[in-house]
Image (cartoon, rainbow, N blue to C red):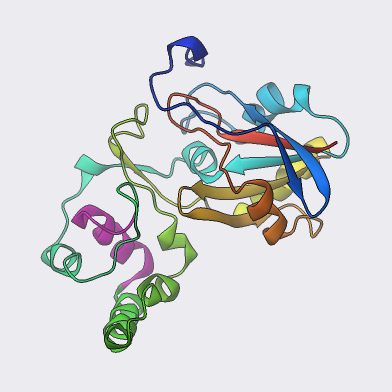
Amino acid sequence: MQKPADPESADTKEKRFKPEIAVKGETYLRIPIRTHIVTEKDDLLDIVKNYAIPKCVKGDVLLVGHKVAAAAQGRIVPIASFKPRWIARFITKFVWKPASKNLGTKPAWRMEIIIRQIGYPRFIAALMASVATKPFGVKGIFFKVIGRDATVIDGPVSYNLPPFNTSITLAPENPNGVAKSIKEKFGISAAIVDANDLGIDLLGKSDDSIDENWVREVFKDNPLGQAREQTPMCIVRKI
């Protein structure tokens, strides 16, 4: 087990957010949870038990980053393990890329793995929809058609710790089931989220008390830090 890095030695940009946030007249405290680097050798429930549960109180909600959930499931793919085919390299020249240097479908490896994830029929349908709507200035249709499992794929970025700096992170399998298992075992509501600089997506939740709009508001400044910060989970507490 790799221990969390010394917070004083973290060399990535500091997460600048206030612990407290107001949502619809209520105030919430966000408590980021540091962990070791999670891999397929770990059990996510053990991670939650060891790091988050000792800090939880009744009524808390635990938000878990999709990367740590995927890592515990072994859904981390080394980028060196495959080579993008010609169609992936070709399509990346035309498909709209979100306004972030760390996201989108470029370079070609990300498009390649999207094709592998969704299959050619849906890929061709998404491509045709994108081509048909592009003359009207409509963006993002390609991503809507390919679906959430493909859009939450994360690629390697230099500031991530190994193995995430050289690997692709796929969407976690059955995120609703993962969140429900956390509540069943520990009695705390939980959600699996994809948090990045473009927004927050709720991938799975333990129960209907968790509203997607609420998650987006309470997490709009993205308090998760999944690089040197090593805080892939966050407790949200109403105060």
Question: Which picture quadrant has residue 87?
Answer: bottom left
Q: In the rendering, at what x and y percent does residue 183 appear? A: 78, 43
- What segment carries the magenta color? 104-119
Q: Is residue 174 visible?
A: no
Quarter in which the C terminus is drawn = top right
Q: Is residue 68 left or right of residue 63?
A: left
**Residue at horizontal 20 percent and vertical 41 percent from the top:** 80
Q: In the rendering, at what x and y percent does residue 133 appear? A: 33, 86
**Residue at horizontal 37 percent and vertical 68 percent from the top:** 118
Q: Is residue 109 magenta?
A: yes
Q: In the rendering, at what x and y percent does residue 51 appear? A: 66, 23
Relative to 169, residue 235 above or below: above
**Residue at horizontal 46 percent and vertical 54 percent from the top:** 198
The prevailing secondary structure element of the residues shown in magenta is: helix
Q: Is residue 139 magenta?
A: no
Q: Nearer the viewer, residue 219 or 187?
A: 219
Q: Nearer the viewer, residue 148 or 20?
A: 20
Relative to 111, residue 179 above or below: above
Q: Nearer the viewer, residue 11 or 46?
A: 11
Q: In the rendering, at what x and y percent does residue 130 appear? A: 31, 80
